[in-house]
Image (cartoon, helix red, strand yellow):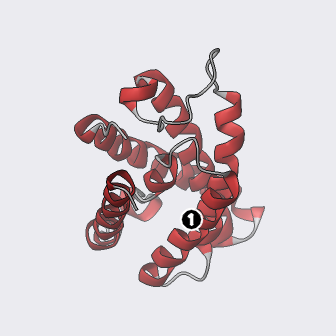
């Protein structure tokens, strides 16, 4: 295991701790916004996996991280479903957003390597997919489509602000 991999694993553990110790508690508030939205920062772990990693590995990592979050949130596979779906869609998004010259396999999807506009677009679509799958799986019916869309929109905005803040503050080179 090289230093880059170790750094990414430590970064992932820190993000998981922040998710379950800080952002889970924020969702317990009685304010209207916390009743209809959450902040999810843990999808950034899957988003920042380097381009050279195979799609199958990314999907497995997404599933395992989702299961860990499910254990702390007392949900039965909802986070695992949403993050696995987002990890699957990551490959499609990367293909759709591929620059003209293609990706360099040594790069990661960070602001340093891809630029702010690309990262904002990639993160927005990924978090939209994650939030929609999460709230759809949570109620498991489209009868409440209005509620699903409201929660998806609020969660997307809150999560996007936090994730882009993370990208701008830390801006990892790898």
In the shown orientation, is residue 164 left or right of residue 84? Answer: left
- Vertical side of 173 occupied by 8: above or below: below
The 10 Å Cα crowd at callout 1, few under 14, some 14 to 19, many 20 or more, is: some
Q: Residue furthest top?
A: 100
**Residue 47 screen position, x and y as percent:** 50, 47
Q: Which residue is mark 1?
A: 61
- Vertical side of 14 occupied by 53: above or below: above
Closest to the observer, 144 or 17 = 17
Whether residue 135 is visible here, answered yes or no, is no
- Vertical side of 51 occupied by 33: above or below: below
Total marks placed: 1
Whether residue 40 is visible here, answered yes or no, is yes
- Who's the residue at 64% across and 25% down the image? 98
- Who's the residue at 36% across and 28% down the image? 112
**Residue 161 screen position, x and y as percent:** 35, 41
In the shown orientation, is residue 154 left or right of residue 13? Answer: right
**Residue 127 screen position, x and y as percent:** 53, 47
Q: Quadrant of the C terminus?
A: top left
- Who's the residue at 40% across and 62% down the image? 1
Q: Image quarter for residue 99?
A: top right
- Who's the residue at 49% across and 36% down the image? 106
Closest to the observer, 39 or 111 = 111
């Amino acid at each position: 295991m090289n230093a880059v991999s170790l750094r990414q694993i430590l970064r992932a553990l820190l993000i998981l701790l922040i998710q379950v110790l800080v952002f889970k508690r924020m969702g317990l508030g009685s304010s209207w916004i916390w009743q209809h939205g959450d902040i999810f920062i843990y999808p950034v772990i899957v988003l920042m996996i380097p381009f050279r990693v195979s799609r199958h590995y990314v999907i497995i990592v997404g599933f395992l991280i989702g299961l860990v979050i499910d254990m702390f949130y007392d949900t039965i596979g909802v986070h695992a479903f949403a993050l696995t779906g987002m990890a699957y869609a990551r490959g499609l998004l990367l293909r759709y957003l591929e620059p003209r010259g293609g990706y360099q396999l040594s790069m990661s999807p960070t602001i340093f390597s891809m630029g702010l506009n690309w990262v904002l677009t990639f993160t927005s679509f990924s978090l939209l997919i994650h939030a929609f799958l999460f709230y759809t799986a949570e109620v498991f019916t489209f009868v409440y489509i209005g509620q699903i869309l409201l929660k998806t929109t609020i969660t997307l905005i809150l999560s996007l602000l936090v994730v882009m803040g993370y990208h701008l503050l830390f801006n990892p080179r790898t």
